[in-house]
Image: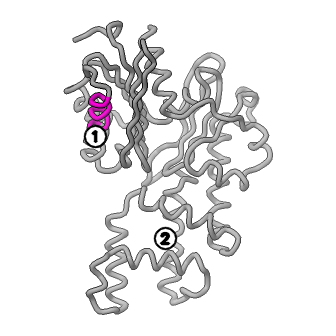
Amino acid sequence: MISENKIDYILAIDAGGTKTVGMLKCITTADTWYHRTDSASLSHDIKLSCDRIDTLAKNLVLQASCDAKNCLVVCGVAGGGNNQNRELLFSQLKQTFASVRIYNDGKTSLYGAGKGEPIIVVAVGTGSIAMRLDKDNKEARFGGWGFIVGDLGSGAYMGKQLVSNVLVQYDKRQLKCDILINETIARLKSSAKSSNTLPSTKETEQQVIANWIKNATSTDYAAFAPLIFEHADQSEFAKNIIQDAALWIEDLAKTAGLGTEEYGDIPVSMIGGLAQAIKPYLSQDLLKMLVKSKGSSLDGALYLGRRTLEK
């Protein structure tokens, strides 16, 4: 194996529930290459996610015409807190790359946002997680338990709340009561393209919806979040879902140290695809502590890669 002090490239990856982005940077020349692909959360289809990350990494090596053995791969990935899933990804990448580091994407977001300075990072996207780096350089993680039981306040959580409310109204035959309900049920019914060849009956609609629920991932549920925010001024369902999500995000920030005696002076950064949309619904206590992130999860992976090589 080539020792890490021989490495000339850092290959940083941010793999999430919505998208996966990669950046290959030459240490000596600062030349940089980028590539993007679909979601690759290890909490979903583990094989598909590993394949997407592996393919993205190989694509960047091809772009740069460099040797994979001279690359340090640093991957921040959703679902990376699961040791078994992380080991599967590690084993696949090690078939090509000599040096690999895999972290939960919360950690790469932490070091991207603060560049090694004390900070609390609350990430709100498809999922939700908070990380804290304190003044003693100790890390702590909060939330991020995954779509089934956690990720409270996230896009997937909001989508799941919406679908639950929609189905209650669907059963009550009250689909005209709210614009958001109508648009959501239309999306669910159109999810099976083949259904237009079937009779338009109640039974057929129910089967189409049931099939969607059976196959839906957190990414599918999170896709409803923009629709919820779009109708926030017109729909009581939308308002209630957003306010509920905001309370969970606020609670996550407090759990990570916001307002506490020990960590209350540490600034908070909010990142992720829904960060800007949820801010108007947060309390002033949280808003006044927010600072602009110094970088992204991808920047954090690059930072951790450089630190690894320096050591």
As drawn, is 234 to the left or to the right of 283?
left
- The answer to which image quadrant residue 25 occupies is top left
Give x and y (percent) for residue 51.
25, 41
Residue type, mark 2 in image: Val
Quick one: 298 or 204, which is closer to the camera? 298
223 to 304, vertically: above or below:
below
Sequence-first tag of 2 and 1: 1
| Residue under label 2 | 163
Q: Point out the residue furthest to the left here.
A: 95
- Quarter of the image for the C terminus: give it: top left
| Residue 232 in sight in this render | yes
Magenta-tinted stretch:
54-63
Residue 216, magenta (yes or no): no
Give the color scheme: rainbow, by chain, secondary structure or one colour.
one colour
Tell whether label 1 touches label 2 (CB within 8 Å).
no
- Tag 1 residue: 50
Tell me the amino acid under the disc marked 1.
Cys
Q: Quadrant of residue 61?
A: top left
Q: Nearer the viewer, residue 28 or 294?
A: 28
Residue drawn at point x = 42 percent, y = 47 percent: 19
Query: Which secondary structure lies at badge 1?
Result: helix
In front: mark 2 or mark 1?
1
Quick one: 236 or 248, which is closer to the camera?
Answer: 236
Q: Report the quarter where the N terminus lies.
A: top left
Between marks 2 and 1, how big is the CA–CA gap? 29 Å
Q: Residue at x 53, y 66 (%)?
A: 161
Q: Position of residue 9 (x, y in %)?
A: 36, 18
Judge whether 194 appears above or below 311 on screen.
below
State the mark number for residue 153: none
